Structure formats: C-alpha cells, structure tokens
Amino acid sequence: MKTTKKALPAKDSKKLIEVLRGRFEKNMHRHKGFKWERVQEKLESQSGKLWSVYQMEQTGGEPDVIGYDKKVGEFDTKTSSWIVTPPEIRKLGGAIFADRRYDTFFACAIGLRTFV
C-alpha cells in the first residue's frame, strides 16, 4: 500500500494546536499525568500525525488526548471512528468503522465485495 506524507501549512498547524490545547485544558480529567507541552511537542514533531488529527477535526470529530484508565469517562460520542481493519478485508476494498451510541458499541464494515 502506497502512503503519501502530508503536512499542514504553518498557519493551519498553529490554529489546530490552539484548538487542541483548548480541548485539552477543558477536559483535564481525561489527561491526568499528561503535560500539554509534551503533547504539543509530539504533535509538532510528527507532521503526518498532525495531518491525520486535522482531518478528524475537519470531519466534525473532536480528537483529544486521553489517558487510559477505567474511569476515563465518555468521549467521542458524536462521530464514527475508523478502526484497524484486517489486511484481508482491506485487500477486498473494505474498511471497518465503529461508534458508540445509546450506550452501545456499533461496528460496521463498508465497501466489501460479495463473498463467494
């Protein structure tokens, strides 16, 4: 699979970083043990990942940094998220996405050719 590295123009990167910082500070209960400066450093050093986060933001998602523990709380309850799709499904042109609605987890496959 061919990948193309994308990079945001500096003004878009700066604006996105500001949005993410605001969301980070608004949701500090999700970020125990995280320091914004470290998160920002990681984002700015990986332009491909920053591009991906930008795309999530553009489609109405609200990417945020979270720490994993059993009390993280609810997040991303408004959008669907692409999830890792097994290579055999990707080869058939399919992909899997999931979302959480009504306190239920839904996973869906799209674009699959007919199986024989």
Image (spheres, grey):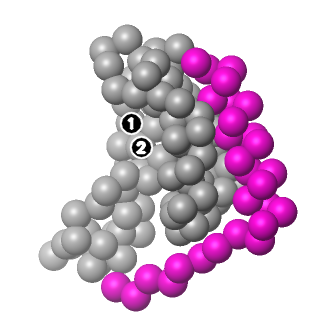
Asked whether residue 49 appears in the rendered view, the answer is yes
The quarter of the image holding the N terminus is bottom left
Type of the residue with mark 2: Ala
Along the line of sight, which residue is nearer the eye, 18 or 83?
18
Provide the secondary structure element on which disc 2 rests: strand
Which residue lies under the disc numbered 1?
Answer: 106
Provide the secondary structure element on which disc 1 rests: strand
Along the line of sight, which residue is nearer the eye, 82 or 54?
54
Look at 22% across and 63% down and name the residue there: 86
In 3D space, how far apart are the residues under numbered discs 2 and 1 (Cα atoms)? 5 Å
Which residue is at the far left?
116
Q: Is residue 67 above or below residue 91?
A: above
Look at 79% across and 61% down and name the residue there: 12
Graded by Cα atoms within 10 Å as few (under 14), some (14 to 19) or many (20 or more), the crowding at tag 1 reads few
Task: Give the mark nearer the N terminus: 2 vs 1.
Answer: 2
Which residue lies under the disc numbered 2?
Answer: 98
| Location of residue 33 in the rendering, given as x and y in whole percent from the top left corner | 43, 22
In the image, taking residue 96 as reference, residue 63 lies left or right, namely right
Question: Where on the picture, by quarter, is residue 113?
Answer: bottom left
In the image, taking residue 47 as reference, residue 33 lies left or right, namely left
Instruction: Give the residues in magenta.
Output: 1-28
Graded by Cα atoms within 10 Å as few (under 14), some (14 to 19) or many (20 or more), the crowding at tag 2 reads some
**Disc 2 to disc 1: CB gap under 8 Å:** yes
Type of the residue with mark 1: Phe
| Location of residue 89 in the rendering, given as x and y in whole percent from the top left corner | 25, 69
